[in-house]
Amino acid sequence: NLLVDALREAALNGSNHPIDDGIARGNDALTLLENRATYTLFIHEL
């Protein structure tokens, strides 16, 4: 699933890259999760 892969990549990048880059990528993942439709889809795919 593309969404799950994107969130997983964002989480991994957040822990493996310099702080500035990690925060930016982490915020992208949080933005996806804050969208209710996206969040529901994400939970469904887990």
Image (cartoon, rainbow, N blue to C red):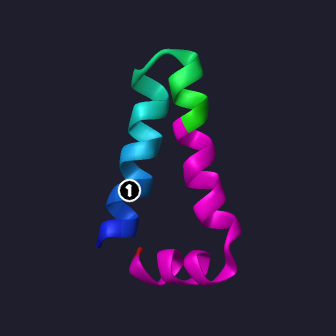
Residue 30 counted in the magenta span: yes
Name the residue at 31% across, 68% down: 2
Q: In this view, does 26 lie above or below 19?
A: below
Residue 28, horizontal then vertical, whole percent: 57, 49
| Quadrant of residue 30 within the rendered picture | bottom right
The amino acid pointed to by label 1 is: Ala
Residue 40, horizontal then vertical, whole percent: 58, 83
Give left or right: position of 31 versus 17. Answer: right
Is the C terminus in the top left, top right, bottom left or bottom right quadrant? bottom left
Name the residue at 50% across, 82% down: 41
Q: Is residue 29 above or below residue 2?
A: above
Label 1 sits on residue: 6
Would you call the spot at circle 1 few (<14 residues within 10 Å), some (14-19), or many (20 or more)?
some
Q: In this view, does 33 lie above or below 43?
A: above
Is the N terminus in the top left, top right, bottom left or bottom right quadrant? bottom left
| Quadrant of residue 34 within the rendered picture | bottom right
Residue 36 counted in the magenta span: yes
What span is colored magenta in the figure?
25-45
Residue 12, horizontal then vertical, whole percent: 39, 37
Q: What kind of element bears circle 1?
A: helix
| Quadrant of residue 24 within the rendered picture | top right
Name the residue at 60% across, 75% down: 39
